[in-house]
Image (cartoon, coloured by chain):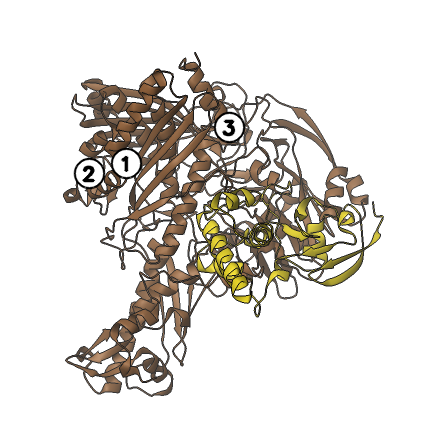
């Protein structure tokens, strides 16, 4: 079974080199090999989005990508989006507007939302709902997630304006 | 800052106590990806276990060959029933008084059943090992329909019949057929039949509440670690009831309870899926004992949907009688309950059909009779309460559909029919015909408020116009107005009638106040997203006068938390919340004595005021709770022990009865069956409101799970017993795109017997939401002759309904 190959992936700015079987799914590479446990596993069929990460500027579901496909790429997870000293406005907004309950979908949800707001800094509610439809939440009914993203967008736009 | 300059209002606000929308303390870790869920746990040398599962729904197992699997690199062991049998662990008790195979013992009874447990160094090696296990099956006749099962000669459970093939008595009495599990009755049969048979108007309907699944985003799983040197077993897992799991593990393994530590870490949603005990837990424990290493087992999504904890699957036949002017006189309900291969529902022991006997709903129905027959079939075991208190979703769906059918029979408006039959405010406490004593309610006020908020008259006028336009060919869209009024029964429950495996369903709280005026409180419940760390601290802040921000709430570690029965059935606030308030009051009682000593007055001469004790009539003389806390640890006070701690075990005197009024406005495209929820208004009365923000979040979430169940979510089987909805490709979970914005509203009718008057809210929106969505669909077609059609109302089924009604020309 074992035919390990050498891979190099940059995760949250840090280059990681390791030997792995090509069939290893990226989500396990992150969670089990690299101890990056923010992205979660919910379905293993690309439906729920709990495993969402950003790869080379695109939202990707890490549960259905082989490590071999991620070789040489730049991966950002929730851990790379913001931490204690530099929280992303989305991280604040989700708390402020009760955009989460059990928290299991939240890392994927926020990771996806960062991309959504990069692609469309001023989305309508409909655009948010469409743009977030690849991420399932079982707890919130989405209403407060939408509100959180709108609030973060407003804050980011205001900060951008202030800086200009 | 000098304390004196702070106003009383500011002191109240500083506490962040009950009634304020305190932001959640849990969120910092979750938004930064720093949660600690069971699959995040890593221990040195940890192994991974996974199941060989049956592809057949009913088959004899003639041979299991594990030799090739044991040759697979990384595979350490393969467990089968034969390995578990000497330990007496090849079967385990279910929470419903039945027993269940841990690993297939000679046969399998449902697709996906656990056949062998492969233990390997990692997930991939385990998966390779599973592929290499060779199982020989001999297919048997498959029984999917419970009615056919009750007629069939095929015996599903040989362990439940005697040597002559006659069914032996079950946990709930005599059985009438070898595939029959129990009959459970409530109410008076003969008087009910007399009333119905002689009534002016009778409406009858048969409805199927389909099988579905709670499907939390995180599946079930555990890590078992047997420390053979110290004889201690630690079991981390997705347990909604960690203490009950500890007791069950002790009872079936023989390990003494003090040597077992069960820990529920962060849980990624439960909704009833994580109450029961599953074969994966038992196998992980055994595998850890066998290998001497920690063993992790995590379900994948297919395992989850196919095997652990389905919900509903109730065939309900109803008759409701009334006078010509609409006063209900009697109700009869018969249920055929499909439990699958094992009765593994999680109900209080004395209630094999849960609280289905709340099925008289919010109405003053003088005579009623309920009969439930449980049946074995070749489906997955379970019958859990998916976001509801034990079978209350089924009960409320039943009565809210029967009301609609009766309204059709009477040619009456369904809102008015509800109004004239509501239990009146002055009738509380109200004893229902099926036995429950409703603690409090004000249904008319809530109903009037709801109908006014949505302009009910206006909606009906608009609907009438739409029907005319449709008939005139001006539109292909119909409009449905869904109504529901529900009464929940939650907070299980009084020990006198509620236990699980003999464990009374009380709950508990233990508080320790630290010298510097902060505190830790531990509870017997466990949050799965409800935000207990936030809201229970609010209850305590108001009770003991220390800021919620200075109170840590801890749950889920059986070595430290007091014994409790866990979180499900909206029982946390009604039971553990009450224990929290009562423990807080014990703290306050001792603090009063300390304050009186410090102020050199009699105990009765001081009174509690927000965050301090003041001398009556002299508010300038006071001791803050912070000062009192310090005094408890540094002063030798005559007659008073040092320290400031309390514990309360709360046995609720009654259940609580939250209620609510929901209205859904829906447009339906007759040609595609596509539904568009234009408006959803939800009024909830959960008694005293602890955190309005959290309540609103619970309502949004519960309604969305209701939308899912009503409009598409199901666990479907084909005739061969194959699960047709085993992945999220087929099993409907709504996304942001399908879900509307909800309008929330409330009335407040405090529970008279709960220390703070709270009733619980987490499940109300699901219980009330399902019939509301369903009624909206059915109401759209009422004018065209539809009486009832079964859920889930997906686009295809709605199209079919329209087609059968001749609406496609």
Q: Looking at the rendering, in which quadrant would you find the C terminus of chain B?
A: top left
Question: Is residue B198 shown above or below A76?
Answer: above
Examine the rendering and report whether any part of residue B351 can be seen: no
Q: Residue at x 79, y 54 (%)?
A: A72
Mark 3 vs mark 2, foreground winner is 2
Q: Nearer the viewer, residue B91 or B219?
A: B219
The verdict on a common chain for dots 1 and 2 is yes
Disc 3 from disc 2: Cα separation: 46 Å
Disc 2 marks which residue?
B423
Instruction: Find numbered disc 2 in the image and state the secondary structure of the residue it sits on.
Output: loop
Colour in which the image shows chain B = brown
Instruction: Find numbered disc 3 in the image and state the secondary structure of the residue it sits on.
Output: loop
* Residue that sits furthest to the front in the current view: A164
* Chain for disc number 3: B
> How many other residues sit within 10 Å of disc 2, few (<14), some (14-19) or many (≥20)?
many
Res. B361 mark: 1
Tell me which corner region of the image, top left, top right, bottom left or bottom right, holds residue B88.
top right
| B507 sits left or right of B365 in the view | right
Disc tally is 3
Tell me which corner region of the image, top left, top right, bottom left or bottom right, holds residue B335.
top left
x and y, in percent, of residue A78 in the image: 61, 58
Disc 3 from disc 1: Cα separation: 38 Å
* Chain for disc number 2: B
> How many other residues sit within 10 Å of disc 3, few (<14), some (14-19) or many (≥20)?
some
Q: Are marks 1 and 2 in contact (CB under 8 Å)?
A: no
Mark 3 vs mark 1, foreground winner is 1
Q: Nearer the viewer, residue B263 or A89?
A: A89
Q: Are marks 3 and 2 in contact (CB under 8 Å)?
A: no
Colour in which the image shows chain A = yellow
């Amino acid at each position: 079974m074992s035919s390990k190959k050498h891979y190099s992936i940059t995760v949250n700015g840090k280059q990681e080199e390791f030997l792995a079987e090509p069939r290893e799914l990226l989500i396990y590479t992150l969670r089990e090999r690299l101890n990056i446990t923010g992205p979660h596993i919910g379905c293993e069929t690309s439906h729920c989005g709990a495993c969402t990460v950003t790869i080379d500027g695109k939202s990707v579901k890490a549960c259905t990508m082989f490590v071999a496909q991620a070789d040489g790429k730049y991966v950002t997870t929730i851990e790379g989006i913001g931490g204690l000293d530099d929280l992303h406005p989305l991280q604040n907004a989700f708390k402020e507007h009760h955009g989460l309950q059990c928290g299991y979908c939240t890392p994927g949800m926020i990771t996806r939302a960062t991309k959504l707001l990069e692609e469309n800094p001023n989305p309508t509610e409909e655009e948010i709902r469409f743009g977030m439809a690849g991420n399932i939440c079982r707890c919130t009914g989405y209403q407060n997630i939408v509100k959180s993203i709108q609030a973060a967008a407003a804050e980011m736009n205001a900060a951008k304006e202030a800086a200009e | 800052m000098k304390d004196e300059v702070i106003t009383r209002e500011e002191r109240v606000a500083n506490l962040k106590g009950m009634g304020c929308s305190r932001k959640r303390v849990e969120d910092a870790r979750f938004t930064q990806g720093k949660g600690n869920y069971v699959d995040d746990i890593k221990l040195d040398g940890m192994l991974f276990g996974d199941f060989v599962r049956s592809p057949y729904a009913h088959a004899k197992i003639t041979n299991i060959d594990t030799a090739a699997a044991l040759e697979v690199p990384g595979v350490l062991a393969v467990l089968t029933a034969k390995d578990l049998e000497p330990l007496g662990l090849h079967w385990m008790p279910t929470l419903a008084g039945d027993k269940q195979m841990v690993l297939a013992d000679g046969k399998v009874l449902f697709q996906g059943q656990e056949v062998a447990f492969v233990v390997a160094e990692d997930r991939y090696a385990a998966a390779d090992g599973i592929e290499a296990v060779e199982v020989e099956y001999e297919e048997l006749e498959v029984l999917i329909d419970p009615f056919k099962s009750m007629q069939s000669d095929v015996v599903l459970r040989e362990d439940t019949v005697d040597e002559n093939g006659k069914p032996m008595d079950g946990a709930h009495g005599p059985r009438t057929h070898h595939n029959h599990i129990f009959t459970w009755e409530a109410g008076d049969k003969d008087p009910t039949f007399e009333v119905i048979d002689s009534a002016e108007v009778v409406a009858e309907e048969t409805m199927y509440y389909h099988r579905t699944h709670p499907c939390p985003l995180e599946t079930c799983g555990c890590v078992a670690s047997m420390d053979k040197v110290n004889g201690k077993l630690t079991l981390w897992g997705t347990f909604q009831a960690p203490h009950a799991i500890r007791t069950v593990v002790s009872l079936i393994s023989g390990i003494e309870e003090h040597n077992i530590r069960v820990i529920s870490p962060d849980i990624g949603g439960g909704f009833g899926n994580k109450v029961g005990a599953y074969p994966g837990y038992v196998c992980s424990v055994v595998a850890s004992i066998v290998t001497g290493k920690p063993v992790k087992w995590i379900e994948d999504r297919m395992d989850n949907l196919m095997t652990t904890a389905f919900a509903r699957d109730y065939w309900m036949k109803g008759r409701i009688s009334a006078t010509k002017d609409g006063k209900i006189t009697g109700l009869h309900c018969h249920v055929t309950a499909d439990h699958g291969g094992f009765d593994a529902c999680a109900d209080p022991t004395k209630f094999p059909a849960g609280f289905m006997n709340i099925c008289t709903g919010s109405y003053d129905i003088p005579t009623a009779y309920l009969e439930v027959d449980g049946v074995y079939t070749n489906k997955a075991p379970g019958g859990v309460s998916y976001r509801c208190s034990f079978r209350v979703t089924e009960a409320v769906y039943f009565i809210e559909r029967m009301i609609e059918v009766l309204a059709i029979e009477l040619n009456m408006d369904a809102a008015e029919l509800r109004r004239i039959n509501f239990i009146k405010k002055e009738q509380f406490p109200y004893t229902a015909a099926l036995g429950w004593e409703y603690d409090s309610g004000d249904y008319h006020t809530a109903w009037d408020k709801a109908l006014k908020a949505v302009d009910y008259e206006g909606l009906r006028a608009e609907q009438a116009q739409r029907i005319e336009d449709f008939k005139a060919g001006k539109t292909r869209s119909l409009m449905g107005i869904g109504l529901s009024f529900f009464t929940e029964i939650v907070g299980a429950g009084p020990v006198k009638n509620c236990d699980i495996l003999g464990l009374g369903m009380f709950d508990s709280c233990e508080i320790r106040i630290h010298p510097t005026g902060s505190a830790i409180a531990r509870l017997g419940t466990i949050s799965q997203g409800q935000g207990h760390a936030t809201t229970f601290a609010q209850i305590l802040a108001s009770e003991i006068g220390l800021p919620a921000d200075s109170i840590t709430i801890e749950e889920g570690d059986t070595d430290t938390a007091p014994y409790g029965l866990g979180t499900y059935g909206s029982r946390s606030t009604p039971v553990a919340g009450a224990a929290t308030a009562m423990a807080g009051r014990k703290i306050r009682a001792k603090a009063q004595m300390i304050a009186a000593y410090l102020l050199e007055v009699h105990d009765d001469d001081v009174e509690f005021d927000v965050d301090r004790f003041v001398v009556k009539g002299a508010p300038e003389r006071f001791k803050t709770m912070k000062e009192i806390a310090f005094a408890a640890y540094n002063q030798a006070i005559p007659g008073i022990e040092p320290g400031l701690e309390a514990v309360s075990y709360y046995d609720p005197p009654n259940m609580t009865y939250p209620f609510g009024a929901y209205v859904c406005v829906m447009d339906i495209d007759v040609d595609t069956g596509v539904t568009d929820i234009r408006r959803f208004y939800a009024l909830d009365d959960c008694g005293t409101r602890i955190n309005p923000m959290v309540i609103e979040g619970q309502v949004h979430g519960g309604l969305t799970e209701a939308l899912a169940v009503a409009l598409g979510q199901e666990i479907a089987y084909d005739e061969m017993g194959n699960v047709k909805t085993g992945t999220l490709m087929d099993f409907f979970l709504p996304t942001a795109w399908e879900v509307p914005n909800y309008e929330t509203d409330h009335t407040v009718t405090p529970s008279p017997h709960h220390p703070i008057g709270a009733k619980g809210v987490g499940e109300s929106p699901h219980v009330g939401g399902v019939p509301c969505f369903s009624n909206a669909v059915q109401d759209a077609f009422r004018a065209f002759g539809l009486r009832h059609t079964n859920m889930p109302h997906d686009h295809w089924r709605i199209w079919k309904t329209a087609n059968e009604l001749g609406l496609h020309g």
